[in-house]
Amino acid sequence: MKKLILLAAIFISAGSAIAQDTVYFANPSAVKGLQKKGSKEQNIIKIAPLSFISGYIPLYFEREINSFFSLQAGAGVTTRNYLKEWVNNLDLDDKEEVKNTWNAPGNDGNSSYYPATDYTNRKSSLGYYFSIQPRIYFGNEGMEGSFLGISYDRSRYNYSSKKIVNGSSSSNGDPVFTSETFKEYETVSDISANFGTQSLYDRIAVEYTVGVALRTITGRRYAYTNDNLTGQYVDGYSDTKKTTPALTFSIKVGYHY
């Protein structure tokens, strides 16, 4: 008899272990911690904290259109481009291989000229920046995960350079600069394909993006050279036009709501 009771107890215990219980919560918020990570918010405001190195300070706004598509727009100001200044100071043989039109009296177009690239007699002033980028997210999870975007970006950099005294030079042979200035500019336009990833945390968004761009650069800068006939300094300006491929990289942080 004891054996039958023991055997029945074993079967009852096994049945209890195999059975599945359904638990009903009176308060649905009790399972909030089990919900999928992500956000139901449809807007993100972002900044690019490292962009000042390239001479622009932008503010971006991204809006979710549906579960896999969004639109991002950006606008801001341009300032001194430290990255380009550093590249210009590198000893690269091909850094001036652009299409330049030299305009100055007494110059036959073949002699070298000296563009104003340093900030000893040159200052930057505010310009503008804007960007538009539609995005497709691969995970159908709103504005989170990996994405592909096609963007158009345009930056206008403004400068002013001190002009020289034509026909004169200092005791060491260098040109003499005046207080009069020449207004310069450089416009950079990118059409690019961008691949990136965006993570959404508690109100915080973090984005990493790399891209390949077709970049067009146009501009006008102050320049001077030695007159071919007299050997004295004459000034003028150089018009630049260049189209080249470029790589882009961006880190953005933002607030989603």
Image (cartoon, rainbow, N blue to C red):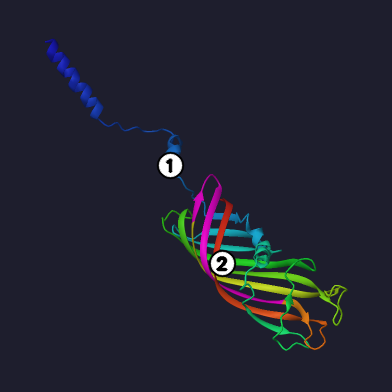
Measure how far apart labels 1 and 2 are at the Cα level. Answer: 33 Å
The quarter holding residue 226 reads bottom right
Whole-percent x, y for residue 238 in the image: 71, 80
State the residue at coordinates (58%, 52%): 253
- Residue wearing tag 2: 132
Left or right placement of residue 64 versus residue 219 in this view: left
Is residue 108 in sight in this rendering?
A: yes
Residue 35 numbered tag: 1
Whole-percent x, y for residue 36 in the image: 43, 44
Of 248 and 90, the residue lying toward us: 90
Whole-percent x, y for residue 7 in the image: 15, 17
Residue 125 numbered tag: none
Left or right placement of residue 7 versus residue 165 in this view: left
Disc 2 is placed on an element classified as: strand
Is residue 57 in sight in this rendering?
A: no
Of 168 and 209, the residue lying toward us: 168
Characterize the local packing of mark 1: few (<14), some (14-19) or many (20 or more) Cα atoms within 10 angstroms. Answer: few
Q: Would you place residue 96 above or below residue 251 in this image? A: below
Asked whether 115 falls inside the magenta stretch, the response is no
Whole-percent x, y for residue 108 in the image: 72, 89
Characterize the local packing of mark 2: few (<14), some (14-19) or many (20 or more) Cα atoms within 10 angstroms. Answer: some
Q: Point out the image quarter for the N terminus.
A: top left
Task: Specify which label sits upstream in the sequence, 1 or 2.
Answer: 1
- At label 1, the amino acid type is Gln
The quarter holding residue 88 reads bottom right
Left or right placement of residue 218 versus residue 23 in this view: right
State the residue at coordinates (69%, 86%): 110
Span colored in magenta: 197-220
Q: Main secondary structure of the magenta part?
A: strand
